[in-house]
Each structure stands twice: as C-alpha cells, then as structure tokens.
Image (cartoon, helix red, strand yellow):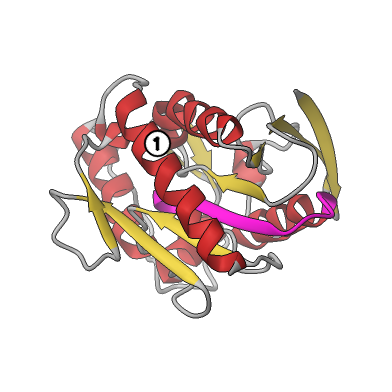
Amino acid sequence: MSHYYDWAGGREAMVRFGPASGPVVVLALPLFEEANRTRTFAVGLLRKLADLGIGGVLPDLPGQNDSPVATEHAMLAGWRTAFAACAATTGRPVHSVAIRGGSLVDHDATVVSRWQFAPAKGEALIRELFRTAHAAGEPVEIDLDAWSDEGGPVTIAGNRLSRPLLRDLNAADCVREGNMRVVRLDTDPAVADYKVEGAPLWRRSEPGDDPTLAASLADDIADWIDRCAS
C-alpha cells in the first residue's frame, strides 16, 4: 500500500507491507541503476516477510525512483536524513535491511538492528560507476579529492550526479558497529555472518528476480529479528 513520509527536504513516497503492528523492516535499496535492477526482488522479499508476520516499508529516497527531487540534487546527507525520517514515522521497533549501497544510507536512523545483504563501500561503488561510464565512452572527469571543485553535475548511465555526492559516496562506508548481521552470496569472498546461494541481480543488464533467494533471505531476516528480541 502506497503512503508518504515527510522529511526536512519535503515529502517522499513509501510502500508498506504486512501487519500494522510489531517489528518492521525499512529497506534501503542499492543506489542508482542497481536499484532499478533489484526493486522487483526487494518487493518480493518484503512480501515474503509479510507472510511471516513482519511488516515492511520501502521508501523512495530524494532523487531516486519517483522522487520529486532531481537526481542531480541528491546528496548522501539528504538520503541519510530521509531514511531516518521514514524509519521514525513507523512508531514501531525498526530493523534496517540494506542491499549493496543501501548500507551507506541508514547511518542516522534509530533502529534495533541492521541487516546488510552484500554491503559495499562507497569507494567500490564509485569505481564501478566510473568503469561503466568509461565503457560507454563517457569517462568521468573529476578529482575525488578536490573538495573545493564546484563544477557541474556529471552524467553516468543517464544519471546526472553532483560532484559532492560522488565525493561523499567515495568516502562513505557501512555501519560496522552495534547489533548487525552481514549476509553475502556464496561467491563473494568477503567476510559475512552467513552466505547464501544465488546470483548478483544488481549486475544484470535488466531488472531481475529470484524468488528462491528472496525466500531464503526472508527466513534469515525473520530469524535475526527473533534473536534480537530475545
């Protein structure tokens, strides 16, 4: 069911799933094109959590999806503020669930726990963005260490992105303290609390889905939330 939440910069859409009481998951999608490739999967994951009796919220962040904010005006600080505001509107125990670059935006939210799937440092995401631009014959001309550079937005894969956003993302990392769990694909050599079989949907050229993977992750999230409550 579609709803809205207010934050310091305006109003954004969010979709609610599952029961209206008890713990709730607020899900942070990956960033940019990865969000488009995984949104169907994320919706399926939240629906499976709803079947397990766990509420869910999928918010639009400023400059993403159907946001009224232009993509070139999106800022990492704004994403974090908006995500925190969305989590606060629930009035329930919140568990952050983040996929890939979504793990960079939940820092300011008051949550019981953080559950991260394939979290990635901002530096790694920026490298991939730049490789995408270079492969498309549109190399990005920006010095990520020149914080005083006030040049205009750069275009990557059709998205106009501000230079401050790119620099902030390049320096950003996931929350690595507190009550948290990291899950990765079994093909990912990075350290994780749990590894699961599946394909990296965010790397596909078109949006995809994996109901089996969604069901496995939903079970793990539900078990994690139960453990956090005990």
Residue 154 percent coordinates (x, y): 46, 44
Residue 102 percent location from the top left of the image: 49, 51
- Does residue 147 appear anywhere in the picture? yes
Q: Nearer the viewer, residue 68 or 30?
A: 30
**Residue 98 is inside the magenta segment:** yes
Determine which residue is flagged by label 1: 34
The answer to which quarter of the image holds residue 155 is top left
- Residue furthest to the bottom: 177
* Location of residue 42 in the rendering, given as x and y in whole percent from the top left corner: 48, 33
Does the segment drawn in magenta span residue 29?
Answer: no
Picture quadrant of residue 210 = top left
Outermost residue toward the front?
A: 230
Say which amino acid is labelled 1.
Answer: Glu
Eyeballing the image, is 149 above or below 52? below
Crowd tier of the residue under label 1, counting other residues whose Cα lies within 10 Å: few below 14, some 14–19, many 20 or above: many
Q: Quadrant of the C terminus?
A: bottom right
Q: Position of residue 227 (x, y in %)?
A: 51, 64
- Seen in the picture, residue 203 relative to 117 is either above or below; the reply is above
Helix, strand or loop status at disc 1:
helix
In magenta, the rendered stretch is 89-101
